[in-house]
Image (cartoon, rainbow, N blue to C red):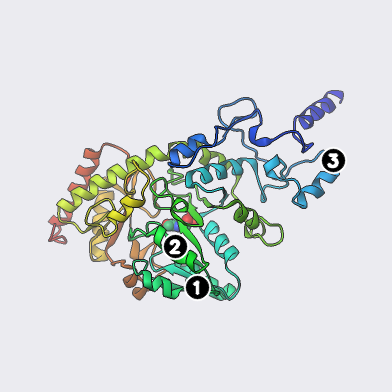
Amino acid sequence: MAETETTSVTVLSGKKRSGDEHDPMVGKKSMVSAASTWDDPAAALASSRHEFGEHGGVNMSIEASATFTVMEPDTMRKMFAGELGPDRDFYIYSRHFNPTVLNLSRQMAALEGTEAAYCTASGMSAISSVLLHLCTSGGHVVASRTLYGGTHALLTHFLPRACNITTTFVDLNDLEMVKSSIMEGRTNLLYFEAVSNPTLAVANIPELSRIAHDKGVTVVVDNTFSPMVLSPAKLGADVVVHSISKFISGGADIIAGAVCGKASLINAMMDLHQGPLMILGPTMNAKVAFELSERIPHLGLRMKEHCNRALAYATRMKKLGLKVHYPGLEDHPQHELLKSMANRGYGFGGMLTVDMETEERANKLMNYLQNCTQFGFMAVSLGYYETLMSCSGSSTSSELNDEEKELAGISPGLVRMSVGYIGTLEQKWSQFEKALTRLQDSGLLKNA
Ligand SMILES: Cc1ncc(COP(=O)(O)O)c(C=O)c1O
């Protein structure tokens, strides 16, 4: 009995609870490098705080608790009043803040060069929380015509019905159209993807941000297709959202998301009375956060190889006469723009598209690529080490109607490829060529 009491006292006294002398940002179980000016996502990640494990482990411990104790009853009141918080190592409940999720959030903020970030259970929960936070009932969004189908459906169907928030969809290349669609005093935000899903159009982030800011409108950019390659917040965007489920995870085994932006935005989104992250509860599990925080340090290496392979395939596919679309090719309409915005040394992205013109031809090609030559898998999503292929019009963009797809530039035979890095480049390329030969032999392909 006495032993039990001693143990419990030791455990509790080991916890920081007095709230005055100890600064968790420089605690002995963490290491912070001197702040440096942000010029590269990998450098920023390496300079961000490294959290050690409870017993000195090189990896941080997982804080699996849903709830946290206090030493004095009054501490609880202070935490709920916002006088004590995670910045001083005071935690209430893991739907609010959790140390392990916060560690991943710090990595995401370093990656995107923002003051703060908050990680969520999915990319869609990050996106919907931001939209619900920044728009008021009766509000208005100006958004790109070419968006991931789920986001398009959220803006087209869900938000008007549930919240009376409407959207005007625009062609991002038409800056006049963007400008004239923003209604000063009514439009809450401009929303687009840095590299669009699935058409791989590259947004002119500095110019679009300037237009929006001139009219007092907040800019939200989805950077799911281009982590490391582009840093939208450094190019003028106010908020960056991610589906971490893709390149950042890299394992095709986790669904997760993040909101990156100013600390004031993240704190407001956590408000006990008004904050959607707190009230709607799109909470990430601490065990998931731990898994992801172990993958972020090699994201830069993975992205470089995704990009190298994608450029090599795109170049070779083009030589074969295929209708390939890749922002790293000089004939891509925004190739120069991407070069002017991209962080040096990562490449032009790990996604490419091949337009097979008809769904039948697209399906046949993917079938040969998966089932005859093992080039890749027919699957949605992206950022996996294997190549993933899907016919966008009938899958991840099926939420768009035919007219919307046409306006977005999504042909019925558009095959989107997330280029993997497994195997050798020549091994994989020969698998691609073999599949293409089978397609030619079937009589379905004439021009390649
Ligand atoms: C560009 C983009 N944003 C957001 C999402 C949604 O992310 P999640 O599936 O993690 O909810 C996706 C999913 O495919 C996407 O492609």
Label 1 crowd (10 A; few <14 / some 14-19 / many >=20): some
Residue of label 1: 157
Mark 2 residue type: Arg
Report the residue marked by disc 3: 72
Q: What is the C-alpha distance between the residues marked 1 and 2? A: 29 Å
Residue that appears at 21% across and 39% down:
426
Is residue 407 placed above or below 301 in the rendered structure?
A: below
**Label 1: element kind:** helix
* The quadrant where residue 49 appears: top right
The mark that comes first in sequence, 2 or 3, is: 3
**Residue reaching furthest to the right:** 2
Residue beneath disc 2: 210
Classify 10 Å Cα crowding around label 3: few (below 14), some (14-19), many (20 and above): few
Q: Nearer the viewer, residue 436 or 45?
A: 45
Q: Dot 3 lies on which element?
A: loop
Tell me the quadrant of the picture where the C terminus can be found. bottom left
Q: Is residue 19 visible?
A: yes
